Amino acid sequence: MNNYGNFNLYDVLQSERPEMLIQHAKPFSELMMHYKCAIQEVETKLNVLNNEYSLVYNRNPIESIKTRIKKPLSIINKLKRKGFPLTIESIEQNLSDIAGVRVVCSFQDDIYKLAEILAKQDDITVLEVKDYIQNPKPNGYRSLHLIIEIPIFLSHKKKPMRVEIQFRTIAMDFWASLEHTLKYKKQVDNPEDIAEMLSSCAETINDVDVKMLEIRNMINKLEI
Ligand code: 0O2
């Protein structure tokens, strides 16, 4: 039992008693602040690598970095969906994607290189790897997901925090963003046709990614 205590998050959010919200808002905000710090640590590491690449190899492997903290309602819904207790402790123990970092890379090989370099850093522990590039989801989704643990240094303690890092190319990000938007549109008459078209688009996008890498390698060979 940690010093956050054990209470039901859903009750707190549903509660019409403001004092209850105020009482429990602090430990929740504190935990979210810890996740935010972990995100900052990861982002700094990635920026350092990008700067180094830029100087040594004259190119940036990272196109952009997006970060997010999962919203309170999404946290509650996920805990409920998975049958976990709705407590602060449960968030830390059972959810790995409260802190999310999305790294959009120029080329597919940059994804694996960056993931390998990060994984080797001695303050990072890789807890889980999901390679949806080698093994795309049935709908065509491609990305490399890493769940890592990284320490944050607070005034009186060092605390390991879990962060989900998603690596994708610009092309994969384009597909995933549009697919995500389309998911929330109203019911369609022909879901199978749409799923097939989306999956086919993902294949086409992957072919483009592979060709772009080939072109880069051909140009690099000429430069040597
Ligand atoms: P958001 O809005 O990004 O928070 P798990 O976390 O293990 O319980 P799952 O689905 O097995 O659940 O995790 P996985 O496969 O690692 O995927 C987690 C995240 O990857 C999702 O987060 C999405 O950001 C992204 N993702 C996974 N599959 C798809 C997909 O088919 N399409 C798109 N566009 N994104 C996907 P959240 O929590 O769903 O959403």
Image (cartoon, rainbow, N blue to C red):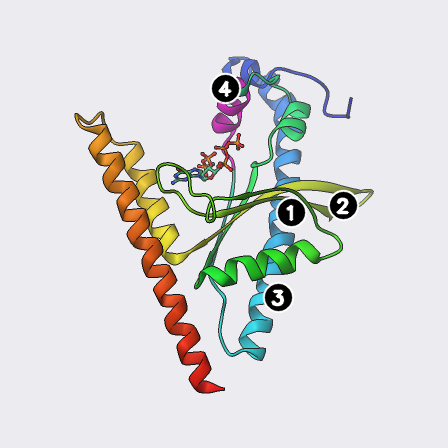
Mark nearer the viewer, 2 or 3: 3
Mark nearer the viewer, 3 or 1: 3
Residue at 50%, 62% in the rendered image: 109
Residue 118 percent across, percent down from the top left: 64, 57
Residue at 32%, 54% in the rendered image: 205
Displayed quadrant of residue 107? bottom left
Query: Is there a contact, CB below 8 Å, between mark 1 and mark 2?
Result: yes
Task: Identify the residue position indicated by label 3 in the image.
Answer: 48
| Separation of residues labelled 2 and 4 (CA atoms) | 32 Å
Task: Identify the residue position indicated by label 1 in the image.
Answer: 37
Among the two numbered marks 3 and 1 on one chain, the one whose residue lies closer to the N terminus: 1
Q: Residues within 10 Å of mark 4 (few under 14, many from 20)?
A: few
Among the two numbered marks 1 and 2 on one chain, the one whose residue lies closer to the N terminus: 1
Q: Residues within 10 Å of mark 2 (few under 14, many from 20)?
A: few
Assign a secondary structure to mark 1: helix
Assign a secondary structure to mark 3: helix
Identify which amino acid the numbered label 1 is placed on.
Cys
Among the two numbered marks 2 and 4 on one chain, the one whose residue lies closer to the N terminus: 4
| Separation of residues labelled 3 and 4 (CA atoms) | 38 Å
> What's drawn in magenta, residue-wise?
70-81
> Eyeballing the image, is 180 above or below 66?
above
Identify which amino acid the numbered label 3 is placed on.
Val
Residue at 77%, 25% in the rendered image: 2
| Residue 81, label in figure | 4
Residue 62 percent across, percent down from the top left: 49, 63
Task: Identify the residue position indicated by label 2 in the image.
Answer: 154
Q: Overall secondary structure of the magenta stretch?
A: helix
Identify which amino acid the numbered label 2 is placed on.
Leu
170 or 85: nearer the viewer:
170
| Separation of residues labelled 2 and 3 (CA atoms) | 22 Å
| Separation of residues labelled 4 and 1 (CA atoms) | 27 Å
Among the two numbered marks 3 and 4 on one chain, the one whose residue lies closer to the N terminus: 3
